Amino acid sequence: MIGEATSSGGGGKDDSPAAVSGKKNKKPNYSRFTQQELPACKPILTPGWVITSFIVVGVVFIPIGLASLYASEHVVEIVERYDKDCIPPDYRNNSLHYIQTSETDKNCTMTINVPKLMKSPVFIYYELDNFYQNHRRYVKSRSDKQLRSKASEGKKNIAWKSDQEHKFGSDIYPKNFQNGSLIGGGKLNPSIPLSEQVDLIVWMRTAALPNFRKLYGKIEKDLQANTTITVTIENNYNTYSFGGKKKLVLSTTSWIGGKNSFLGRAYIAIGGLCLFLAVCFVFVYLLKPRPLGDPSYLSWNRNPSGQMN
Amino acid sequence: MDSSNPIERSSSSEISFKSASRSLSSNPSRASRGNSVRTGSFHDLGSRPVRLGSRGGDSEMFSASQKEISDEDARLVYLNDPAKSNERFEFAGNSIRTAKYSIISFIPRNLFEQFHRVAYIYFLIIAVLNQLPQLAVFGRGASILPLAFVLLVTAVKDAYEDWRRHMSDRIENNRWAWVLVNDQFQQKKWKDIQIGEVIKIKANDTLPCDMVLLSTSDSTGVAYLQTINLDGESNLKTRYAKQETISNIPEKDKISGLIKCEKPNRNIYGFQANMEVDGKRLSLGPSNIILRGCELKNTAWAIGVAVYCGRETKAMLNSSGAPSKRSWLESRMNSEIIALSLFLIALCTVVSVCAAVWLRRNSDELDTMPFYRRKYFRGSEPENYNYYGLVAEILFTFLMSVIVFQIMIPISLYISMELVRVGQAYLMIRDTQMYDEASNSRFQCRALNINEDLGQIKYVFSDKTGTLTENKMEFQCASAWGVDYSDGKISTQNQQVRCSVKVDGRIVRPKMSVKVDPQLLELSRSGGDSEEVKHVHDFFLALAACNTIVPLIIDDKSDPTAKLMDYQGESPDEQALAFAAAAYGFMLIERTSGHIIIDIHGERQRFNVFGLHEFDSDRKRMSVILGCPDGTVRVFVKGADTSMFSVIDRSLNKKVVRATEGHLHTYSTLGLRTLVIGMRDLSDSEFEDWHFSFEAASTAVIGRAALLRKVASNVERNLTILGASAIEDKLQQGVPEAIESLRTAGIKVWVLTGDKQETAISIGYSSKLLTNKMTQIIINSNSRESCRRCLEDALAMSKKLRAVSETSDNIGTSSDAARGPVLCCRVAPLQKAGIVALVKKRTSEMTLSIGDGANDVSMIQMADVGVGISGQEGRQARMGYMILYNFYRNAVFVFVLFWYALFACFTLTTAINEWSSMLYSIIYTSLPTIVVAILDKDLSRRNLLRYPQLYGAGQRQEAYNRKLFWVTMLDTVWQSLVVFFVPIFAYWASTIDVPSIGDLWTLAVVILVNFHLAMDIIRWNWIFHVAIWGSIVATFICVMILDAFPMFVGYWAIFHIMGEVSFWVCLLGIIITALLPRFVAKVLYQHFTPDDLQIAREVEKFGHQRDIAAEVEMNPIMEPPPRR
């Protein structure tokens, strides 16, 4: 404190004889920054701005919404649930037993009818429902290190380049998902390095939601309407224990992604709402106008006594 | 002793305009300064109470002086024998250390201090929890990051401050002083000075330690000191060497002796010691000690012996940092944090309950569920894999959710608040409008943490003297022997006379000219023998003699041949009186401890000063016993009217007494400070009696002060009234305007003064504190029961309170009723503090105290905000907004995490990268808030001053209140729902993976909260643009960097998802949808119920068309305006 006082305490009154001389001026330098006088724009929500912004949002949102809705509508999607159908009738009431024993024949053949023209590329997905791949135990149980050390060139990003794995022909020969199944396992071909085990890599990219799809393959050929596709599925994976659904999905794609009308509808709704609000505010401003910057609205002016409190 | 006074312990934080302000929290008591009759320093004048003259202190000191300093309690100092002085006790050396840390102790001590914040402990616990393998939600590094960051930032700040202290310590310690070594004065560094050493100080040197004066260049042993560094008072104080030691020359005479003094304490106005020299035992008082930090002035040299060194000096003991004031906002914030914690616990409970339900429901399938796999089938017997039973699982879930949702409690908030305050203080300090040309001093901010309270002040307590007024006293009127000169009016036309005298062949004139009344001047000059003339002479003699002024002859700057007579003294009133006496021909020329010389109309007369009874706040008067040249002995007394009329013999001159009383009333109505002067001739026997008892009392070791007081009251009686003086204390420039502004701003101004009621009221009118429109209620009540209860701190003096309270406005109960300004007169310093404490307690409003003198210290410490008011900027609004915003932005984030937990089987998988969630409140969103809180402002300076009423927004806490808190939280939930569910629906049943959707959420939240802030910025300048858009860009970059590390799961996720159109469509939709309700609410609110700030902003922007109208509207409108 003394140190501070000696350095700063000198600015006393000027009537003491010794204190006057030799003092440096402590007046702070003027700058627009320290005086808080930087040029600034002061936006105020005037009626014009409010209505304009609502209209702009509406005008921008509705076309986007329409466009994405249109795109989504043009996506052709075929969803075939196979977990139920692939159980032979004898096992209908005992599906758990069916899936858990190794004696049963898991192969299952489905025929899919293409209702509309599907332009290439047609993506093949398998969809799982009620499957918490994002479950903490599941996420934790994976070891990236292990995966990397097994595979000398563990470049995981290949997984996203699943486009490499073009599969041609309309017949598909699915494998089981061994790393998920309780029984068996080890059906991965040990001779193929992990980095080439594309399906595994795709599977290992944890799905964000309990209802998810995984890309399985791609058909680089247009599928004409009324084409019949025969799919042979090895129904190995046990989803019966937790009531999960298994589906096979064939879908084309658009710029907005797969068949999902949510974004389009939401955009149209928000855009419409904004236009509606714009109209509302036009009425509000017309019916109950308030002059901007009218000092008579200041609280002490509104209060007849002119007194605070 | 100090701890017995509650006010002492409250802080001394103050923000002050004056560099001379002080933050000493000592308990100065003047009663103990017994010994010397000639003690120089005292304020007299009942109207200006002594500095911190606490009565409590008096009595304590009294009891302390009852006992002889026992050997255990004493410090023995052997003169000029440092070896012997220091052999028994380890006295502190003279090196000082204001720095808190050394290199080694820095880390542990700093950490220890930082962890005093409860929030930090919370984060530490969370970080530790996260290290347990079962709970490890985040990686080790990520979990420690936020805590490490804030600790580091604070540590760097502390280290820098400490480094500066180290530097200043080093400079202090290495200054040179002349120390007697082997009978020769040699230069020695300050840090090497030891107790018992004899030190020589030269003129204008700073004292290195506390010393007992031995001798000075003055033959009577007087030394003048400037104590500005110690107590901020710029006038000179006199200190005395003992007669027995002044003749010694240290180089030749071997000095030896023993000083027995009290242990080091903080009381800078008290000192008790005995000195044994040459077999004689002398008692030492506060007038014999000179303290570290003071400067020697007008004395060629002084020699003293070091008694307290280094950290034991009184200055250092007083510099211990006072505990800081906590701002209202901060304490309020703590309660909100508790609310947030409850919220957090609620969220965690929901998650764990859901998890429990899920586990129960699926308990049969857990073994086989492919994503759960409770059993581990490797061995022959399936065993549990990482499964510890249902209860443990639930507990783990709970703890993990605490870890995941930890940022609900904003750790960075403390740091942000600190940074914001530093920034605000910087702006305040650099404000050119806060610079005072006259004193060349700028605004100083002594306590950072109460900046925001400046915007909420409801009560301003102001001292009058020196704060509202200039404290430059001017003699105005005199009533001598019952005749009022200048007709009771402040005359301005009177000729200005400067009489001059010759000293040493040179013409010396008083430095200050005084307006004189020609009639009175005539009388004082006339040598007639009439009673009137005699009394006028005595009157001026009393003015010239009855004081402690030290006359100094200084060079006249304008005229090199002439010299000026300057009167140095502690009380400006005394100075004014002495100058007045000089103007009327009674010029004080010399003062030594034994005599004074007064030039009376060219004739030099010597008066022996036999004794002097200094001013104290009980008697409220002082007296001097003079031996006049004609052989008579007289006692001259001056003091406050109340105390004087009780000792004046009314029977002697009834007419004069009554006339003087009338004049006093007139003067005080004019706002002048009044003093009454009386005298008495002492007969030989009376003088003998007095002299005997005075000698006995002043050399007494026990109870010296009380004895002296008794002696004084014995001699101060049956006085003849001589007259009264009136001194004007001019209002400072701009005071009326300032007070008017404060009033319109809805701030209640209370002026606390020691003046008479009439004086106070008149000052009140001239300062526009009171106006004619107001109803004046004067309460002259005795100390009421309630009052006494309220002034608990002043309990020790409650007896005296009653004595004083005949005219004292005890505002004890009026505070509830007090809507307007309040004037309290006849208030003693501790009463001031009591009043402040009372208002604080009763109303729980923000209080601010302004004062200049040491007698205001207790009041300043008591108030929420010490001296100084910016009054212009609603700082609290900004800070309040910042806190609210901090809560909001962390809550949005936590809610997004929470919703996701519901979609991840209640298992707290985090979609958002752990590093992102840690950096969120540190990098992604913190800078804009800080910048906005520092730099944004509602209105320009000009407009704020134009509408002082706008200040009310802060008082009503419009920016931060509970309602706003909950509305914000509601908005938060909505926004988090939008942020979370738009991507969920958009990507339902798609190939989206966890890191990708996490990145989308991260970016959406960051952009959203920054837009949210941007919506509320009032003045956009380029800094805001940089901060806000920069933060968003920085977030993108950070997310990309994090996704470029192959060891993270989210490797390359951001680049994949950014390639998809749906990502951008989602982002845009989220931002607009989330902000839509807020925007609509804001527009509606502003349109239908605009607040004052809003209107004023519009006026500012569109006002140019309406300037004229606005001016008119400033007047209150009597009828409600027509609403269309």
Image (spheres, coloured by chain):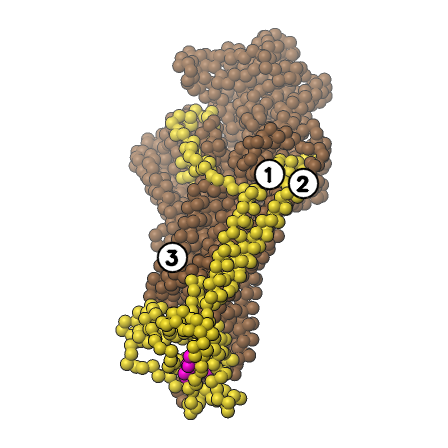
Q: How many marks?
A: 3
Q: Which residues are magenta?
A: A229-239
Residue named by callout 3: B1038
Q: Secondary structure at mark 1?
A: loop
Q: Is residue A302 left or right of residue B509?
A: right
Q: Position of residue B1078 (x, y in %)?
A: 56, 52
Q: Which mark is residue A292?
A: 1
- Could you say which chain is coloured yellow in the image? A
Q: What amino acid type should be assigned to the residue bearing mark 3?
A: Cys
The label nearer to you, 3 versus 2, is 3
Earlier along the polypeptide chain: callout 2 or callout 1? Answer: 1
Q: Is residue A136 visible?
A: no
| Image hue for chain B | brown
Cα separation, mark 1 vs mark 3, equals: 43 Å
Q: Examine the image and state in which quarter residue B948 appears.
A: top right
Q: Which mark is residue A309?
A: 2
